[in-house]
Structures are given as structure tokens and as C-alpha cells.
Amino acid sequence: MKGLILHDQLCFAVHTASRALDALYRRELAELGLTYPQYLVMLVLWERERASVKELGAALRLDSGTLSPLLKRLEAAGLVRRERDPGDERSVLVRPTAEGARLRERAEPVPLRLVAATGLSREDLGDLRRILDRLTGSLSEAVS
Amino acid sequence: MKGLILHDQLCFAVHTASRALDALYRRELAELGLTYPQYLVMLVLWERERASVKELGAALRLDSGTLSPLLKRLEAAGLVRRERDPGDERSVLVRPTAEGARLRERAEPVPLRLVAATGLSREDLGDLRRILDRLTGSLSEAVS
DNA sequence: GACAACTCGATTGTGCGCAATTGAATTGGC
DNA sequence: GCCAATTCAATTGCGCACAATCGAGTTGTC
């Protein structure tokens, strides 16, 4: 009789926290015209200047079924350009446009506002990150 | 230059952990014919025997746009029955069918297998739950 | 009793997430 | 050089999540 109580389950706590985070990001990112996953893609591109779809998928742990339409929306919004890799025609390279690069400045303050909204201390945030990273590692192993 | 590095961001760790958990639940629940959100609904019904759509939404923090089609799929699978509340015709009551109730036994061992797969100690699991609950609380407050 | 405000659920539209399949391009073995 | 296996992106189909809207039903006020 122990296992099946909703609020005892860790999974529910993680799931709910994740959706609550998404909701707050959605609000913060709305004025930038980005959804949260689109913001994650832009984060990678701001770091690297260019990345293939496969590299984006590896960084974000997303597959092409999610990334392809998402990247098309970013391209339609004028934030990103997609082109075949001349060296390997199977590969598609994604780069930020000038407008996409400019967006970075406006995105800069977002994480600070989010951290403030968590209401957690620096120690708790560190603990959380550390435990979550181990959790994700163990789970990925368990799935495969 | 500090805020915008992907792997420094807590949100990404939460998001990724949540999806990794989902993936493992998906595997465990596949033989029961349930998705993870459907499993959450059944958890509530196994606890309460009946609940209105509004009560389910409050328990799981989901709105009717998510619950309505989900409940219809559960009804189509023969696990749940939906009927108007005779006392208040606006309300819809959801109950498990006999088959839905029987499913509980097969769902019982799932959480134990999941906890094992996390690879975390009892202490870490407790810390994680405690911090996540505070996080979700602060975030819900911040959104409203 | 009539009317306005509210509650509740369903519906619609958009986007994310994943499994499975397809097809083009590349690589490796022979 | 040829063929099989592999890699990579795109597509399709399904389900979840949420915002916005709608309509039926209920409640409160006068």
C-alpha cells in the first residue's frame, strides 16, 4: 500500500516543478517571441555560432522529430538560417541570423530573473543541480 | 556573459531529468497500456474512488484542455466511466471501472522499480523532494 | 422572478516530445 | 568499382500541455 500515493512520488514532484519552470519561462520569453525549447536552441547557437541538427539534438537531448519543425519556425521568424553542409550533404547546419544574434542581449537578464523567482538559496540550487544531474545520468543508463 | 550558458542553467537540468523520468515510466507503463499522465489520473482515482474533472485538475495541476481528451481515451480503454453529477449538472464525475480498479495491482510494483533506477540514496531522494516542493511553490507564486 | 456574474466542461489551435518510417548521402568490405 | 550497412534529416502519427473561447448550468442581487 505504500507505493501508490500520488504525492509520495518523486516523479510527480519533478514533473510539476518542470512545468512550473516552463510556465515562468514562457512568460519571460514571450516578449522575445521565443518558446522555451526555442530559447534552448538559441542558447546553443549563441555559444557556438553554428551547429548541425545532430549536434543540437545531442546538446538538448532532442531528436529530429522535435527539432525539424522547431527550427523551421525559428527560420520563419528570421532568427536562424539552415543550409546543407557542403562537406557532407546529409548534414544541415544551423546559424543565427544577425537578428538572432541581436536577440541575445535581450535574453541576457532572463536567467537572473528566474533564479530570483525560485526563492532558493545558492546552496539549495547547487544541491538541486548536483542531485538532478546524477538522477538524469542514472535514468539514461537505466533506459538503455 | 555568465547567464547564458546552457549547462549552467537549472531549468535545463530539471527539464532533462523530467524527460528522463518520463521515458522510464513510459517503458514501465507500456505493458499496462497507460501513458504517464494517464497513470497519474489513475493514481488519484485509486486513492479516491471518484473525482470530478475539476478535482483531478487541482490534484495534477492540469486544465480541462488536457484532461478532457485524456479522460476520453481512458474511457475508450474501458478503465474509467464519466457521468454528470446529478447534484450539479455542470460537474462531471470520473470513476474507475472494475477493470480500472484491477489494474492497480499490476501498477503497484512500478514505483519501486523506478526508485531503484534513480540510483539515489534515501537521503538524496528526500532532499530532492523537499527542494523541488519549495521550488514549485515559489514558482507558482511568481507566476500569479 | 429576472438578470448579471460566475463556474464548469468541452473545444480549438499551436507547439513540444517521441516512436517509427522514409529517403538521400556516405562509408566500409570485398 | 559495387553493394550492404550506416548516418542523417525529414516526415508522419499520436499524445500531452496550455491559452483562448464557448455554451450550459448555477448562484447572487435586486
Image: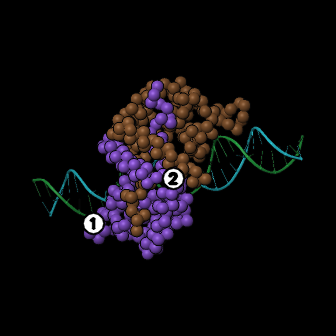
Chain colours: A purple, B brown, C green, D cyan
Is residue B24 among the parts visible in the rendering?
Answer: no
Q: Which residue is mark 1?
A: A88
Q: Which residue is mark 2?
A: A119
Amino acid under label 1?
Asp
**Disc ID at residue B77:** none
Q: Residue at x 52, y 66 (%)?
A: A32
- Which residue appears at 35% of the width and 58% of the height? A59
Q: Which corner quadrant holds the C terminus of chain A?
A: top left
Point out residue A60 in the picture as x, y percentages from the top left corner: 38, 56
Q: Estimate the x, y position of residue B34 in percent, counting from the top left.
A: 46, 36
Up the image or down, B58 lies above or below A75; here it is: above
Q: Is residue C28 left or right of residue A86?
A: left
- Say which element carries label 1: strand
Name which residue type carries label 2. Gly
Q: Give the chain of mark 2.
A: A
In the shown orientation, is residue A103 left or right of residue B83?
left
Residue drawn at (54%, 51%) of the image: B139
Per the model, the C-alpha gap separating discs 1 and 2 is 47 Å
Residue B106 visible from this viewpoint: yes
The residue at 53%/58% (across/down) is A26
